Amino acid sequence: MESQNKPKKITIIDQTLREGMQFRGLVFSREQRIRILEFQEALGVDICQAGYPAAHPKEAEIVRKITAYGREKGFRIRTAALGRAGKEDADTMLGTGVDDLHFHFHVKPSADQGEINRILENLKALVSHIRARKPEARISLALLDLGRTRPQFLRSCVAFLTRDLELEMVSLPDTSGIMAPNQVFDAIHGLASQTSASALSVHCHNDMGMASANAFMGVLAGASVLEASALGIGERNGIADLFTTARQIRDQGISMNLDLTNTDLFREYYGYVDGIVREQTGEALLQYNFPFFGAGVRTHVAGTHAGQDFGTVKEEEFYLNLLCSRGLVARYLARENLARDLSPGILDQITSTVKDRSIELGRRLKRNEVAAILKQHDPG
């Protein structure tokens, strides 16, 4: 699905620190946040959403310290904080010294026009308050939520935020995680044409397993900011995964500052976050079937799929069952240091026996079983 609104370049907001602490109650220490900020800086992330200062005075202090750390080190990455769309939270966020202020607000579907007008007037007062205290601040407002907001109100609200308030960014989150990729595309496509100076940001939850696909389609529809996290950690089932979503976007010819070529550093970043997840929850996310970084992308059963140079796992693994091909059997034997340079005839016999034995046992064959078949057909 193509769009004339498709951006030439996107901004990346890494929400591992803020949204990540909504994943099963994770709590990142100051030291862990600084290390994660260092990973983000090295990888070319544009904005680090560092925390939610209004949650607790200690949280505000940590956000202030990691913001100061980035400035002391001369980091290019901008820091941001999230809060409710009110002056109290805004003042707390301003006190941390962050570059960007991100807010969320919610309009109930049952709200009448009078209530809506009051909300919009309060937002106008909030923005004026911030501009007076920190004119250089970049402000983002997240309208909750994309999948449950009436289209007509969504259009009028985005118009108010971008034209009347002249916000730098409007975030459009699928907070409930209920949308499909085509629905996200349709919702954002119509809005992108009415926002010339302001950027639309896409933030998708993974309740239906669509977060990365939805975020990808949101960018194709015209959103020029991607909100994502390492390993996709976030509230409930998480949000869009940073690497895989950004890579798919890049492969559509859309540029970004994020360095997707440094897969070793990305793997280190993901491993670091995964270690924290494992320590605090007892379970790991960076498992066998994790996209790109998991071992699954380098394991093969059917011969037509073998030989794909993909992912960060260095060694390929081969499993032999009734679907194996002669070529895969040859690679398995070499990989397991069982045999090399067998004749095509011998390989055909071994492959046929492997298939027969797999059907008899109703499973894949173990190494000792393959070795026995090899000895049967090639005693020398």
Image (cartoon, rainbow, N blue to C red):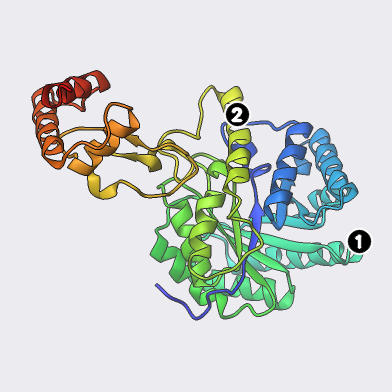
Q: Residue at x 49, y 71 (%)?
A: 221
Secondary element at image label 2: helix
Query: For the view shown, which residue lies furthest in the front direction?
Result: 380
**CB atoms at circles 2 and 1 under 8 Å apart?**
no
Residue 42 visible in the displayed image? yes
What x and y, as percent, mark residue 359?
10, 29
Q: Residue at x 24, y 22 (%)?
A: 366
Mark number displayed over residue 133 = 1
367 to the left or right of 182: left
346 to the left or right of 191: left
Picture layout, residue 70 above or below residue 368: below
Picture layout, residue 255 above or below residue 373: below
Q: Nearer the viewer, mark 2 or mark 1?
A: 2
Give the amino acid at mark 1.
Arg
Q: Residue at x 61, y 24 (%)?
A: 280
Q: Residue at x 85, y 62 (%)?
A: 130
Picture layout, residue 185 above or below residue 358: below
What x and y, as percent, mark residue 70?
83, 48
